C-alpha cells in the first residue's frame, strides 16, 4: 500500500484516460519529447501527477489551438520560462539541462535549431533540458561548446568554495548526466587545472570524439580504458598506466573492463 507521503504514479492506460487520449498517443508524445515519464524498477512507464497535468495541457494545445509538436514544446516552455518548477527531491532544479535551456532562450534558438546543429534528435535535447539526463559525454561537451561555455562551469564547479585539502570520499560530484559516468571533483574552485576522478561503469564511453584547448593527463587507478586519439591512435591503458596528450586532438574513450574503471583525469587550462 502506498504511504501517505509517497507520490502518486499512474500507468500508461491510467494517465491516458485522465488526459483524454489513447495510450499510443502518450507513447508518440514521448518520442516527440513532449513528456518524459519516469520508470519503475521493472522498467515500466509511470506518470506523476505533474506529468498528467502536462499531458492535459498538451492535449489542449493540440485540439483547441491546433499546434504541432514543436509549437507545443515552445508553448509549454513559455508557461515556465525560468524553469522554476520543483524537482522530484523538492529542490529548485539548477541542473545542467536547465542552464542550457536558459542559454538557448538567451540565444533566441529553438529546440529544433540547436538539435540540428549538434546532430541529435529534438526529443533527446528536450528531455535533457527538462531532466538533465540522457545525453552522452560527447554531446554534453558539444552543447557546452555550442554556447561558448564549459562542462565544468555548467556543473557548478567554479561556484564552490575552495578547499586546499579535499579528503577521500568528500568529493563533490558533477550531475550524473551521462549513463555510467561519475565525475568526482578533486580540487575545488577556480583553478588552472581541472582535477577529476572518473568512475566508469562497464561499457561506459564518451560515445564519440571531442576536442578543446589545453593539455590532458590521464592515470588509471583500476580497470582498463581505451583512449583513441585522432581516430587512429589507440591506447589501451591498465592500472598504473598514464597518458599525456594535447586536448586539441580529437579524443574518445571507453571502459574496456568488465567491472568499474577508475581514472585520475587532469585538464589544463580548465577548458572542458
Image: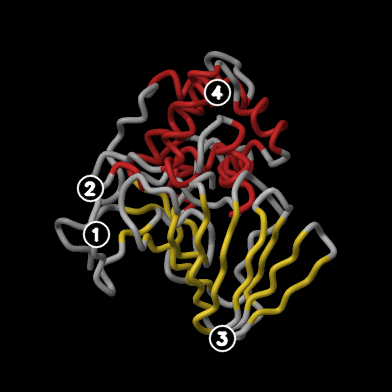
Residue 229 or 100: which is nearer the viewer? 229
Spatial CA span between label 2 and label 3:
32 Å
Q: Quadrant of residue 18?
A: top left
Spatial CA span between label 2 and label 1:
10 Å
Residue located 41% across and 49% down the image: 47
Earlier in the chain: of badge 4 and badge 1, it is 4
Q: Residues within 10 Å of mark 3 (few under 14, many from 20)?
A: some
| Residue 85 x %, y % | 30, 34
Earlier in the chain: of badge 2 and badge 4, it is 4
Q: Residues within 10 Å of mark 2 (few under 14, many from 20)?
A: few
Residue located 45% across and 47% down the image: 152
Mark 4–mark 3 CB contact (< 8 Å): no
Residue of label 1: 164
Earlier in the chain: of badge 4 and badge 3, it is 4
Spatial CA span between label 2 and label 4:
41 Å
Note whether residue 28 is visible.
no
Residue of label 2: 161
Question: Does dot 4 land on a helix, a strand or a loop?
Answer: helix
Residue of label 4: 72
Residue of label 3: 239
Amino acid at each position: 500500500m502506498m504511504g501517505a507521503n509517497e507520490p502518486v504514479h499512474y500507468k500508461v492506460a491510467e494517465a491516458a484516460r485522465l488526459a483524454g487520449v489513447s495510450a499510443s498517443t502518450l507513447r508518440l508524445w514521448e518520442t516527440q519529447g513532449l513528456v518524459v515519464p519516469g520508470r519503475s524498477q521493472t522498467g515500466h512507464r509511470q506518470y506523476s501527477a505533474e506529468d498528467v497535468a502536462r499531458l492535459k495541457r498538451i492535449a489542449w494545445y493540440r485540439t483547441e489551438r491546433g499546434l504541432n509538436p514543436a509549437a507545443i514544446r515552445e508553448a509549454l516552455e513559455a508557461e515556465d520560462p525560468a524553469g522554476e518548477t520543483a524537482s522530484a527531491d523538492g529542490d529548485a532544479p539548477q541542473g545542467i539541462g536547465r542552464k542550457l535551456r536558459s542559454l538557448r532562450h538567451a540565444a533566441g534558438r529553438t529546440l529544433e535549431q540547436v538539435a540540428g546543429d549538434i546532430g541529435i534528435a529534438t526529443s533527446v535535447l528536450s528531455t535533457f533540458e527538462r531532466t538533465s539526463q540522457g545525453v552522452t559525454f560527447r554531446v554534453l561537451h558539444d552543447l557546452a561548446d555550442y554556447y561558448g561555455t564549459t562542462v565544468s562551469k555548467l556543473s557548478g564547479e567554479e561556484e564552490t568554495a575552495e578547499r586546499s585539502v579535499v579528503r577521500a570520499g568528500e568529493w563533490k560530484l558533477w550531475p550524473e548526466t551521462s549513463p555510467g559516468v561519475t565525475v568526482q571533483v578533486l580540487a575545488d574552485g577556480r583553478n588552472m587545472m581541472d582535477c577529476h576522478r572518473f568512475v566508469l561503469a562497464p561499457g561506459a564511453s564518451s560515445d564519440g570524439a571531442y576536442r578543446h584547448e589545453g593539455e590532458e593527463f590521464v592515470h588509471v587507478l583500476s580497470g582498463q580504458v581505451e583512449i583513441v586519439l585522432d581516430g587512429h591512435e589507440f591506447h589501451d591503458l591498465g592500472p598504473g598506466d598514464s597518458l599525456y596528450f594535447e586536448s586539441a586532438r580529437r579524443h574518445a574513450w571507453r571502459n574496456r573492463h568488465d567491472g568499474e574503471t577508475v581514472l585520475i583525469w587532469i585538464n589544463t587550462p580548465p577548458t572542458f
